[in-house]
Image (cartoon, rainbow, N blue to C red):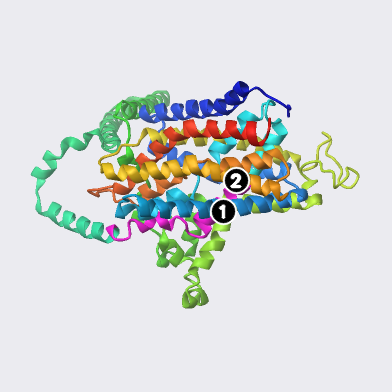
Amino acid sequence: MPESIAVGDLIWCAVKPIIKIIVIMGIGFLLSKKNILTVETSRNLTDIILILYLPCLIFDKIVTYISISDLKSIGVICLSALFIYLTGLFMGILTLILTPVPKQWYGGLFAAAIFPNIADLPIAYLQTLGAGLIFTEEEANKGIAHVCIFLATLIFVFFNFGGFRLIEFDFREKNSDDKEKSDDKEKSKDKEGKDKKLKDTDIENSSFNIFNKISLIAASKSQSNTLTDENENEDKNENEDKNENDETHSSSNELKTLKIKSMRELPSQTLEDVIEEYNRPTKYRLKPEMGPENNLKLIMTTDVGISNENIRSAGSSNKIVKKYKLGWLVFLFQNFLRPSSFSLLVSLTIALVPWLKALFVHTEQVSVDVIKDAPDELPPLNFVIDICSYIGQVTVPFGVILLGAIIGRFEIQKIKKRYLICLIFLALLKLCIMPIIGIFWSNKMRKIGWIDDDMNYFVVFIIFCLPSLSSQVYFTASFSPVDGDERIQLDCVSMFFLIQYVVLMISLPIAVTYVFKREMEI
């Protein structure tokens, strides 16, 4: 690391990652507006990231750049994460006391205050800084490994210990009311005749109905084609049959093209489509009688769709668990089987055991004579690291693109002006006051000797500067009723995220520049 860098160069180094993040988020924003990155596609990509890309990234970085000598750093990270969550809780309480907060958003307020968006943003920042001017590539990769450990603490608190229930808390009364309303609506619809259906032609704008129309047209065409084909095939030979098959194949391709074009020509999808997509699991919310296998399957394949019902149903088939109400404990351990959590446990075990780590990467603790290299002069299982590195490198770009896509779908229906005070107040606390607390905390850790290198110092500091967890939007959508008259929870979280990212683009470069010049003395 260079001894002294001009202030202008440090400002550029702090702003450059923000520019990269804005551009990638802008791409996601445009793709969502053009309906190229649809809500369903976004959800599938999110699940792929959680099931495949992120576990590979965690395994690659931790096994390669964490060793037994980093135990102290891991302890500092866990302690710092706990302090961050407790500080966020205090800020939520402060916001609740000093500002007007909607009663329907108490849980969402504390979720937004406590849980930061660890993963995409800090990793993207470190990857840009690892160009050599501030940090080397190896230092940046080690910093990413530390971020992965921070991420693990977030996963444990949010999923294993049920932090997501804060978001569900805001819908505890509305769910029962919505059931009654939906029953009344169904009865009224049964009484009304076909005239009502003819009046409701406004739903033609939705992609679902257009797809249904296309499929009906295609079905009618295929029926007419089959009837004419039956009459013609009596006098035709096998070669003509092949030509007809080719024609039907080409017509199906044309139908697929028509579907894609019609979807992209529709108005941009909004939060209503997000609710409709993510609220699907609530209609089939896992219940105790469905068995623990389905509960475990949901936990392992997605991050959205779980609720307090899953905690109650966990281990319900076991008499002891049911008798002593230990479902929460079963649920806690089930969440360790999440791909990201499982990858972290396995990678940390390998990284902290020298002879296991030597199977994947060269280490100073184990000589080459003890574990022979493969013919390419690399450890015998290094190909696993190579595969994980290749797959995991797309995690951050996709994550930032999806973040831009969800921002592109924000559509705030109505929110009282007085509630804007609490949103702005909390955003300023998280993104302006929290970084100052982070500087004091990091300095204290370094002063007592618990932080002894600049990269560890910077990673601990930057986690204090992050906005709220982006998954909160999806969880809020999954609990929101599809036919609800109000969606104050989604309006609040959407507005809060917009305010946060406007403030972030200014506060983060200023805080990073200050730390570089004053605290790290670069």
- Residue 181 located within the stretch drawn in magenta: no
Q: Is residue 493 visible?
A: no
Is residue 104 shown above or below 503?
below
Q: Does dot 2 land on a helix, a strand or a loop?
A: helix
Q: Which residue is mark 1?
A: 83
**Count of numbered circles in the view:** 2
Q: Amino acid at mark 2?
A: Phe
Q: Does dot 1 land on a helix, a strand or a loop?
A: helix
Rendering coords of residue 195 (x, y %): 8, 43
Q: Is residue 208 visible?
A: yes
Q: Which residue is mark 2?
A: 440
Rendering coords of residue 460 (x, y %): 62, 44
Of the 4 image quadrants, the one containing the N terminus is top right
Range shown magenta: 148-174
- Residue 149 located within the stretch drawn in magenta: yes
Is residue 10 shown above or below 75?
above
